Image (tube, grey):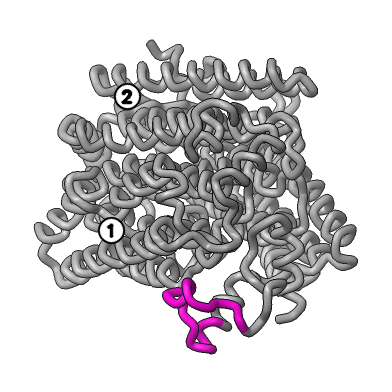
Amino acid sequence: MSANLTYVIVVGVLVAAGVTLLLERSLTRVLMGVILLGNGANLLLLTGGRAGGAPIVGTTDPEQMSDPLPQAMILTAIVITLGMTAFLLALAYRSWHLNGHDEVQDDVEDRRIMDLAIRDEGPGTADIEVGTGDGDDDGPAGGARPGVDVVEAGRAG
Amino acid sequence: MTYLVPLPVVMPLLGAALTLLLLGRPHAQRWVSLTVLAATVAVSAALLVQSSLHGPLVVEVGGWVAPLGIVLVADQLAALMLVVSAAVTLCVLVYSIGQGMADGHEETPLSVYHPTYLVLTAGVCNAFLSGDLFNLYVGFEILLVASYVLLTLGSTENRIRAGTTYVVVSLLSSVIFLIAIGLVYASTGTLNLAQLVDRLDTLPDDLRLLLQGMLLLAFGIKAAVFPLSAWLPDSYPTAPAPVTAVFAGLLTKVGVYAIIRTETLLFPGGRTATLLLVTAVLTMVVGILGAVAQSDIKRLLSFTLISHIGYMLFGVGLTSSLGLSAAIFYVVHHITIQTTLFLAAGLVERRGGSTALDRLGGLARLSPVLAVLFFVPALNLAGIPPFSGFLGKLGLIQAGVDDGGVLAWILVAGGLVTSLLTLYAIARVWNLAFWRTPHVDMPAADDAEQAARTEGAVEPDRGGQSGAVLPKLMIAPTLALVVLGLALTVVAGPLFDLSTDAADDLLRRTPYVDAVFPGGAP
């Protein structure tokens, strides 16, 4: 079986555009990237099966039928992508609701530990005086309001 | 007995539907979830006994014959995984009920917890039982979608931030898996694992390597293998303690299971053995160095989780019977122990008000029960004799020595160093959180008891001492898992025999194929 060149090129373009968008900071663009990637993968699945008439007994000669299995798999994948799109939209909306933007943020705790290393205050000295430089509000997440702490630390960094 | 095979998938799904109908009636929800998961444990145990006595059990879903329909296969490896994960999910469910997660705690108010948790269980079981690549994908998606919801429960700012990274990375791995499936189907015309065994052998070598690489990449992200593991310590620790515990125990191990399955059944011969061994040693060493640098218990444990995935890859990469059986033993051990440690970390958070090491101290005196619950699995994780962690590492190192190659010796050294550094990281937690003089910010015993009362803990009134401030329903499942971890040591002999049997079946490949196609593969 030889693959259809048009399909292959379209899949390539979709995946390339999807990956580019996936690398963006804004969650809405990431969502677009996920949709394009998903469509690219679906089209690739379709390319894997034989092309032909509708695979219904009685309407098409069995030799002329297209392969129905990739189509069934694509239907499943489309449903999953639909659910994920809805979920990501909800995440983006919630993020916008909380922060006023929908940008994917860095791992704050990771950066805090890197700062400790730069100031040569390894975690081994935690019992003496960690966090003297940045006061209480910039300390590690925990206590009563972990979310607020981390976000403040993130903005400070 | 084949009618038992679909039950670990079907029962949690039906249970999820039932708990969804019972929204707003937390009491009924709890009993449904508990019953369903207890039944899943029983069925899984029965499957393990049956499959080790009579070989793999196969069910053709909907009565469609094998290459056309989907098959569910319960061989020894799958059944063993099912038993351990069902037991762990049951314990974590009890713990989360004890934490009051299901009955209107402020931060996690959602009665959607029970249905989602059951769907997660169904997804995990489906992935273990699947005898078909696309069904494996569906299993992964079920458990991932449930995990997205659980990770962002309550949608607080912190969880949304961490959840975003997790969701995007998981979606990417799913797309890679889907593309790999498309390529496998295009090149072989089937997705049935047993049928793929023969058809993949006839493919050109470079094409096989491409397919193998794509699948490894997809599973490597899910299993948090080193260069693909950065998402894990960022996202897991922000979730509620029981959710983190069940994720840490199960989700990465489903990825490891998929790697074991595809590497042995579909792509034997160890063409990627070198790649696996190199990533194994990097995962072990880089992971544990990350753990040493952390100053928060949950994050530290997340890094040890990544690090110990390396041990399992080590066993798979050796491609010997001993290596593989030690890897299977290690998976069983690690599911139990890592979950226990995260549950203990949840107890620390409840008792000390935080999991940050610089805010904790003196817990050993304040809560001796908690100290024991943390200390035993911690030593087990580090591999102190005679615990199961030691036995698993011993098996792996023996397999490495038997292999005798340069890379195998490097891995043996890496494994020993990782074990030592694990002990160091764990000892640091112990010194700072448990032995140090109590921190001034720490709530004293009376205050904590007071706080627990106002929070409506389950049984704050019984027993006068400090351990009593922790709800008994949280202590009991943690204790049960600690005991299960110790039991793994006691029954290590039979368990290792079982994993050796499973490994031999995997390496021979014929038991699996013959069970699916009794009359020979079409």
- Estimate the x, y position of residue B118 in percent, counting from the top left: 61, 29
Quadrant occupied by the N terminus of chain B = top left
Q: How many marks?
A: 2
Q: Which residues, given as a range, are shown in magenta?
A: A116-132
Work out whether B34 lies above or below B456.
above
Q: Tell me where residue B270 sits by quadrant.
A: bottom left
Few, some or many residues within 10 Å of mark 2 (<14, 14–19, 20+): many
**Residue at which label 2 appears:** B56
The residue lying toward the viewer, choosing from B474 and A23, is B474
**Residue at which label 1 appears:** B314
Work out whether B487 lies above or below B429.
above
Residue B186 visible in this rendered orientation of the protein: no
The residue lying toward the viewer, choosing from B320 and A111, is A111
Instruction: Tell whether B169 sits left or right of B376.
Output: right
What subunit carries mark 1?
Answer: B
Residue A139 visible in this rendered orientation of the protein: yes
Q: CA distance from mark 1 to mark 2?
A: 26 Å
Q: Which amino acid lies under the numbered mark 2 shown in the image of this protein?
A: Pro
What subunit carries mark 2?
Answer: B
Q: Is residue B398 magenta?
A: no
